[in-house]
Image (cartoon, helix red, strand yellow):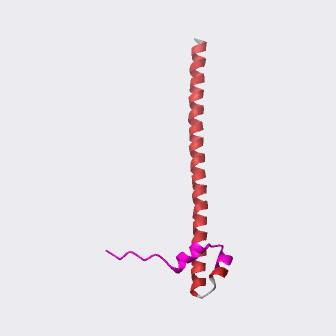
Amino acid sequence: MLQTTFAKQREQWYQEGVEQGIEKGIEQGIEQGIEQGIEKGIEEGSYRRTLEIARTMLARGIDPAVIADVTGLGEDDLNALRNPPPEDPPN
C-alpha cells in the first residue's frame, strides 16, 4: 500500500512538473515572440524612414550615388523610389 501511495504521489509530481514546464515554455515563447515583433517593427520603421530621407534627397536633385552611399540603400530601392509602380484606379 505504501508503494501504491508513493507511485501515485510520484505520478502527481510528474504531472505537475510537466504542466509547469508547459506553462514556462508558453511564457518564454510569448516573450520571445514579443521581442522579435518589436525588433522587426523597429527595423521596418528604420527602413521606412531611410526611404523617406532618400525620397527627399532625390526630390532635391542629389546624385543617386551619394544617396546610396549615405543611406546604404541599393540601386533597386532608389529605382523604386524614382519610378513608383502605378496606383490602381478606384473602383
Specify the farthest residue to the bottom. 60
Image quadrant in which the C terminus is located: bottom left
User: Where 83 falls versus 60 (above or below)?
Assistant: above
- Residue 67 x, y percent position in the rendering: 64, 80
Quadrant position of residue 47: bottom right
2 w.r.t. 63: above or below: above
Residue found farthest to the left: 91
Quarter of the image where the N terminus is located: top right
Residue interval drawn in magenta = 67-91
Q: Residue at x 57, y 73 (%)?
A: 77
> Which of the two residues, 40 or 54, is positioned nearer the viewer here?
54
Count of marks overlaid on the render: 0
Question: Does residue 16 belong to the magenta stretch?
Answer: no
Asked if the stretch drawn in magenta spans residue 74, the answer is yes
> Looking at the picture, how far across and down is residue 44, in whole percent?
57, 66
Give the camera-side residue of 51 and 38: 51
- Residue under the point 49% across and 77% down: 84
Answer above or below: position of 28 versus 37.
above
Residue drawn at (59%, 22%), measured in percent from left and top? 9
Which image quadrant is residue 39 in? bottom right
Q: Residue at x 57, y 78 (%)?
A: 52
Nearer to the camera, 60 or 33:
60
- From the top left corner, tell me how far across and down residue 90 is, in percent: 34, 76
**Residue 69: which quarter of the image?**
bottom right
In the rendered view, tell whether residue 22 sits above or below residue 38: above
Q: Residue furthest top?
A: 1
